[in-house]
Each structure stands twice: as C-alpha cells, then as structure tokens.
Image: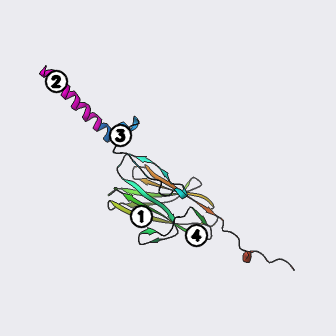
Amino acid sequence: MGRACGHIRNLASFALMFLLAAQTIGLAAAAGSPTAATAITPPANTASGTTPVARNQPGEVTKAVFTTGIKDHEPVDNVGVLSNDHTHIYFFTDLRHMTGETVTHRWIYHNKVMAQVAFKVGGPRWRVFSRKTLNPAWLGEWQVSVVDASGVTLGVSTFEYVAAPQTKSSAAPAPN
C-alpha cells in the first residue's frame, strides 16, 4: 500500500509540474484556458479604434493615443479624426513590464507601411512616441501597429485623416 501511495504522489506531482509547464509555454491558452503568461492590451484609444491583441509575454501597452502634441511626456489630446490643415501627428504609447524589449510603431496607410520607428524599452514603465509628417493628399484611414521584436502585434490604433472644411474667405469671389 505504501508503494502505491508513493506512485500516486509522484503521478500527482508530475501532473502538477506538467500543468505549470503548459501554462508557462502557453499550451493551456491553446486549449482555451487563461494563463498567467497571456496579457491583453486594453483598448486605451477606443475613440480612434484600438484593437486589443493577446500575446504570450507579461508586458502590455496600457495607453495608445494619437495626439497633436506631447507635453511633460504625455499626449496633449486624443485625436480620432485629424483634418489635413494639420501636417503632423504623434502616436504615444505607455508600455509596462517590457524592460529590455524592442517595440516598433508601424505606420500603415492603404495597406502600405509608410514608416517604422523602433524603441528600446528602458524600464518597467516606458512612455514613447513617434511623429509622422502627413501629406495633405493622404486622406483616409491611418493605422499604427505596435509590434514587439518577435513580430507579435501588441495593439492596433487608427485615426481618420480628412479634408479640412472650406471657409467662405477661401472660396472664389462671386462675379458682379
């Protein structure tokens, strides 16, 4: 009886070790169970269409915002629609628990990568931004994907670049 109990204890220990290892490498996630190793980026910029994305790392994007400026390491506003009388826009991200990783802002317009800006994360909370100069003719939806060094998309945000409204003073004068 003592020998059987020892085998059962060993089997139970092995099963526990297997479950812990499966969670660590993400096997439980593949089976549909949540794991401690899976993080989902919150939709911090829902006004402009941020999409949360799962990844098998503890780090995350806690804030993703398009803005017209940065002051004191923070965005000055949250832009979902930008008129083409503005030719610059910033994309700000607040990254957590990604020290030592490289993260890239990938600017996409009409399914074409227009720019990529890589950042080395230097601490447990790291705020970074990239700036894009826009041609006023590049109207439509723009997207920035936040991508880690292994190519995993951490989040996607969008904004709409639209024609500025015409003012009466810019219209041609009426003939007399």
* Magenta: main secondary structure: helix
Judge depth for marks 4 and 3 and give the one in front.
3
Q: Residues within 10 Å of mark 2 (few under 14, many from 20)?
A: few
Residue 170 at x, y percent in the picture: 72, 76
SS at mark 3 in the image: loop
Specify the amino acid type for callout 3: Gly
Please say if the residues under marks 4 and 3 sit with CB atoms less than 8 Å apart: no
Judge depth for marks 2 and 1 and give the one in front.
2
Marks 4 and 3, how far apart in space? Answer: 43 Å
Taking the spot 71% from the left edge, 71% from the top edge, the residue there is 166
Residue denoted by label 2: 5
Residue denoted by label 1: 128
Above/below status of 106 relative to 35: below
Above/below status of 119 relative to 37: below
Q: Which residues are magenta?
A: 1-20
Q: Quadrant of the N terminus?
A: top left
SS at mark 1 in the image: strand
Marks 4 and 1, how far apart in space? Answer: 20 Å
Taking the spot 66% from the left edge, 68% from the top edge, the residue there is 164
Specify the amino acid type for callout 1: Val
In primary-sequence order, the first of circles 4 and 1 is 4
Q: Quadrant of the C terminus?
A: bottom right
